[in-house]
Image: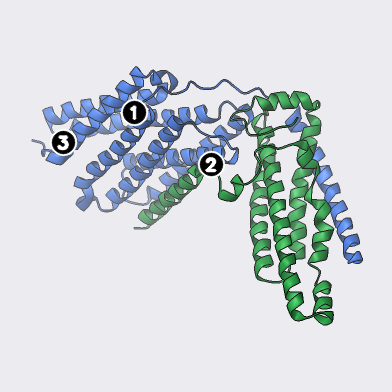
Amino acid sequence: MAVPLAHFQQLLWALNAAVGFVLAALLVLRKNDRVYPAFSFYIFLTLAQAALLFLIYRRWGFSSTLAWPVAWTSQAIVMCARALAVAEVCRHLLSRYAGVWALAWRLLLTSAVLVFLFSLLAMRKGWFSVLTIAQLGLELAIAVAIVGLLLFAKFYDVIPTQPLRSLAIGLCLYSCFSVLNNTVWERFLDQYDALWNLLGMLAFLASLLLWIVALRVPSPAPTREELLLPGSVYPSLSPQINLRLHLLNKQLSQFWNVGESEL
Amino acid sequence: MTFLFIFAGLVVFLLSLLVWALRGPRRNAQKQPDSLSLDDLSRRHIIFLPQIRQILAPQDFSFLASRGSPKLAHRVRKERRGIALAYLAAVQADFRKLLKLARLVTLLSPEVVAVQEFERLRLSCEFSLRYQWVRARLILGPTPLSQLDGLTCIVSGLAVRLESAITELGERAALASELASSPHGHGVNLE
């Protein structure tokens, strides 16, 4: 028979499920599910995962042979949904600006893939399980993508709306925590196992609360694409810029020499 | 244990970047005017560089020290240093204005070139470092004329770049109307 879950863990699980349900309800009632379909799908999936695992743990036990594959498979599906939610946040923030968006999504995707591969390679020599490595790599990639997105926004003076900002923060913080949690868990597996789920649930609860606050009111619909300048403007600048930069530098150096002799 | 340090370090670094990215504009950045105009772009700081060079020339201070008094020379040096610092702040304000306008042009372009954007990022970083360096040298030690020259080149380069961009846009009125529809206003006024 399974080892019974700790009482506090059960309470926290129930609380997480309740708060997740509130968020899901808010998403539907405030029609935010239409604005953020991928994020909503992710939240619904987490609820479904929690319900499924609860039934399995209750019926067959926490350490049953069925629990492990179901838990990890559902986790893989939820993580893919998370990645889609992150992509949605990125699209909401930058897709209005066609040129910047084209640059940003390529850079962010490349960074995320590189970080994912780095994680796989870095941890390959350790004693980590394949699933943990994949999860850690994906969480780190998500965190990198969100931080990169916010850096892009800062550089181009694009101000994210409050809900979008909260979604990004929540996703990033949870991913960062997951990375730490997974790393520590793998290092101190025996001593840390009981705490691992608990801390993970607490981190997710914090993210859920952040999202509830952000999505308690209807979010503004995505803005249409901005009116753009003619396509020939930007690419035609480069040679002119280089030439004029060169000329200006030459003028400046001559001017400087003249100025210096006059001093 | 190595993994723990590597990933913990990465997470800390990412969280620091997150906090920095979410921070509002800096105090001195808020001081800059809300609107930009083409007139501002044409009034470049470069025209004041000879005067600034002149006020920082060591010959002046030697002359004052020899004909007047060391106290007088010290006072003049202090005052002139204040002027140079104000000039430096103006250069920085120019740079920020130009950068703001460059970003707006990029935001409203259907296609952007990564190399151009990275160049601007590099210019920004270079400017920031040089600015801090020159400022520190002005406050603490001997006058760094060569650095001031380098800093001026960066700003001027960006000014020329933006001037080209504006020229390419053709009709100023058409540009103004398009920029007026930009997000958050961006505080740009090309009228």
Between disc 2 and disc 1, the foreground one is 2
| Badge 2 and badge 1 both on one subunit | yes
As drawn, A161 above or below B78: above
Which residue is denoted by mark 3 in the rendering? A10
A22 vs B24, left or right, is left
Q: How far apart are marks 2 and 1 (CA)?
A: 28 Å
**Image location of residue B165, percent across then percent down:** 77, 35
> Please, what is the three-letter code of the amino acid marked with disc 2?
Leu
Q: Which label was assigned to residue A151?
A: 2
- Front disc: 3 or 1: 3
| Secondary element at image label 2 | helix
Quadrant where the C terminus of chain A is found in the figure: bottom right
User: Which label is found at residue B177?
Assistant: none
Drawn colour of chain B? green
Q: Distance between the residues labelled 3 and 1?
A: 23 Å
Q: Earlier in the sequence, mark 3 or mark 1?
A: 3
As helix, strand or loop, the secondary structure at mark 1 comes to helix
Q: Where is residue B98 in the image (x, y as percent from the top left)?
A: 71, 42
Where's residue A134, x and y in %? 37, 39
- The label shown at residue A77 is 1
A10 versus B130 height, above or below: above
Q: In which chain is the residue bearing label 3?
A: A
Q: Quadrant of the rendered structure where residue A22 is?
A: top left
Q: Image point 77% across, 64% down: which residue? A: B145
Instruction: Please provide percent x and percent y for residue A158.
Output: 56, 34
